[in-house]
Amino acid sequence: MTLHPILTAIVLIIFGVLAVPPMLSLVRERRFFLAGLMFITFVCFVAAGIVSSTVPPGQA
């Protein structure tokens, strides 16, 4: 049994949203390189969530 693509998308977007508070904290501490890595992580998780939500169930 495989995971439903919408559930996978929801989990990935939640992980992306959870990356935002540490990223903002790093910006306040002026650690811009680490904050940039967190931003890339946020973008990757959200993009993967959007892509996985477009896959029809049973096709993955």
Image (cartoon, helix red, strand yellow):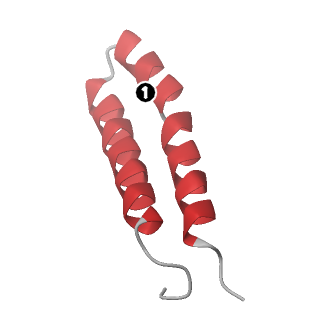
Residue 14 on image: x %, y %: 58, 44
Residue 37 on image: x %, y %: 32, 41
Q: Residue furthest front?
A: 56
Q: Nearer the viewer, residue 4 or 36?
A: 4
Quarter of the picture containing the N terminus is: bottom right
Residue 31 in the figure: left or right of residue 15: left
* SS at badge 1: helix
Residue type indicated by callout 1: Met
Q: Which residue is under mark 1?
A: 23
Question: Mark 1, residues whose alpha carbon is within 10 Å: few (<14), some, or many (≥20)?
Answer: many
Q: Residue at x 51, y 47 (%)?
A: 13
Q: Nearer the viewer, residue 58 or 33?
A: 58
Residue 5 in the figure: left or right of residue 46: right
Q: Residue at x 33, y 45 (%)?
A: 43
Q: Nearer the viewer, residue 59 or 49?
A: 59
Residue 38 on image: x %, y %: 38, 38
Examine the rendered structure and indicate whether residue 36 appears above or below residue 15.
above
Q: Nearer the viewer, residue 45 or 53?
A: 53
Q: Is residue 29 visible?
A: no
Q: Residue at x 27, y 32 (%)?
A: 33
Q: Residue furthest right?
A: 1
Examine the rendered structure and indicate whether residue 48 appears above or below residue 56.
above
Residue 34 lies in what quarter of the image?
Answer: top left
Q: Is residue 11 visible?
A: yes
